[in-house]
Image (spheres, rainbow, N blue to C red):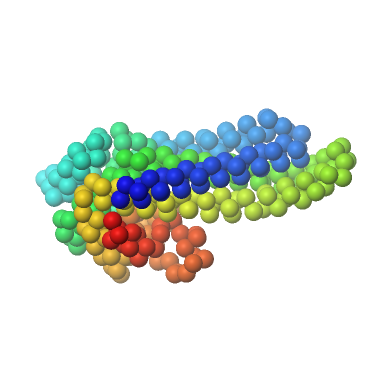
Amino acid sequence: MYEQIARNKRKSFFLVLFFLAIIFGLTWTFGYLTDLGVGGLVLAVVIAAVSGLIGYFGSDKIVLAISKARPATREEFPHLVNVVEGLTIAAGVPQPQCYVIDDTAPNAFASGRDPQHSVICVTTGLLQKLNRAELEGVVAHEMSHIRYYDIRLQTLAVVMVGVVALLSDWILRSVMWGGGRKSSRDKGNIAGILIIVGLVLAVVAPIASQLIRLAISRKREFLADAGAAELTRYPAGLASALRKIAADTEPLEAANKATAHMYIVNPLKNFRGRVNNLFSTHPPVEERVKALEAM
């Protein structure tokens, strides 16, 4: 269990480093091909950072409003509140606020920029269809996302994707406006090769950055599964919950493409296959269950 947590942390760290390497390459290309220099880079970073900060500080309120979630009181949902309280003590974090979505499809998510501003939201279907051990596994999974600052990591990834998209777009526009031709005249024949490399990078980088962001998301799901096993000391509970949630055929009406990545199991129907898995925010449930059963 501890080995898997450490391995997933290392993989996520190297994925972020690779992300930064892409941004560095685009930054160098952008500065080489244009006359905007550092000023243009600063503007690109500021635009991406502002949108990221809005999502960072308001992500929990935005997703709760979109999902039509309401506070879960102790009087109405004592079972849920008691489970959250117990796992909060085990995790050693401030107690998250509890919310519920009135939907018969079983699912759950966590949100908030840090443990001090966190929420755990479950559907009423989850409370109806899971036993206590399974519910503890799901809540422990979401508690692990909070404990490991996964929302912060995902926000960082979104900001990086924004920077990559802006730089790529600006590189392409600078070449279209003649920046590349000017650089070629001023810097010699080698500039022509660099322009081609820059164009290829500008086209490929946004796709690569999205794939990296999705890969980070999948690694954090594995990490949260391992963290849940650490908190409950019962991996079979979460494994059983994942099977039930994945096998449930009822659609989650509150979910959409903007929020689907936050749920413990992707509520949107996906096609299976190795290629499609690359574009998924979640690892296949079968792989997650296999990893839990091996603990």
Residue at point 32% right, 41% down? 146
- Counting from the top left corner in percent of width and height, residue 23 is at 61, 41
Residue sitting farthest toward the front: 3
User: In which quadrant will I find the C terminus?
Assistant: bottom left
Is 282 on the left or on the right of 147, as rendered?
Answer: right
Residue at point 24% right, 40% down? 91
69 shown above or below 268: above
- Counting from the top left corner in percent of width and height, residue 58 is at 39, 38
Q: Quadrant of residue 252?
A: bottom left
Q: Nearer the viewer, residue 278 or 95?
A: 278
- Counting from the top left corner in percent of width and height, residue 253 is at 33, 60
Q: How many marks?
A: 0
Is 238 on the left or on the right of 216, as rendered?
Answer: left
Q: Quadrant of residue 151?
A: top left
Residue at point 69% right, 43% down? 170
239 shown above or below 169: below
- Counting from the top left corner in percent of width and height, residue 40 is at 68, 34
Q: Nearer the viewer, residue 171 or 212?
A: 212
Q: Nearer the viewer, residue 2 or 224?
A: 2
Is 83 on the left or on the right of 251, as rendered?
Answer: left
Residue at point 65% right, 34% down? 41
Is 24 on the left or on the right of 15, as rendered?
Answer: right
Confirm whether residue 100 shows in the render: no
68 shown above or below 251: above
Q: Quadrant of residue 92?
A: top left
Residue sitting farthest toward the top: 39
Confirm whether residue 287 shows in the render: yes
Q: Nearer the viewer, residue 295 or 222?
A: 295
286 shown above or below 101: below
